[in-house]
Amino acid sequence: MKKLTLSLMLLVIVAMSSCSVIGGIFKAGAVVGVIAVIVVIAIVFWIISMFSGKS
């Protein structure tokens, strides 16, 4: 019975730490995605301003 309890505790500890790791990866991915969208929008505005400034 003691071995089962120890195994169950180990499983819970491993599951909790892996969930926090996955959560961190998704948060980092969201930040990178937002930054990428901002950069793309800035490039599009820059290209549009280049074409509209020459005419």
Image: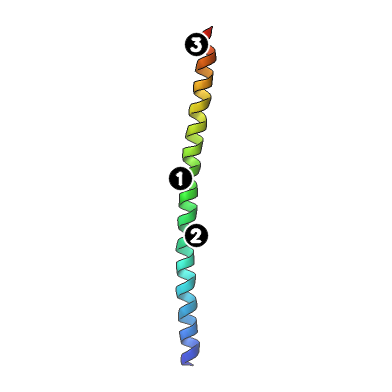
On screen, 17 above or below 8? above
Mark 1 residue element: helix
Residue type, label 2:
Ile
Which comes sooner in the sequence, label 1 or label 3? 1
Residue 52 point in image, percent of width and height: 52, 12
Mark 3 residue element: helix
Q: Which residue, given by chain and number where applicable, does mark 1 sit on?
A: 31
Marks 1/3: CA–CA distance: 33 Å
Q: Residue at x 51, y 29 (%)?
A: 41
Q: Give the image's coloring scheme.
A: rainbow
Mark 2 residue element: helix
Residue type, label 3:
Gly
On screen, 55 above or below 42? above
Q: Which residue, given by chain and number where applicable, does mark 2 sit on?
A: 22
Q: Residue at x 49, y 93 (%)?
A: 1
Tag shown at residue 53: 3
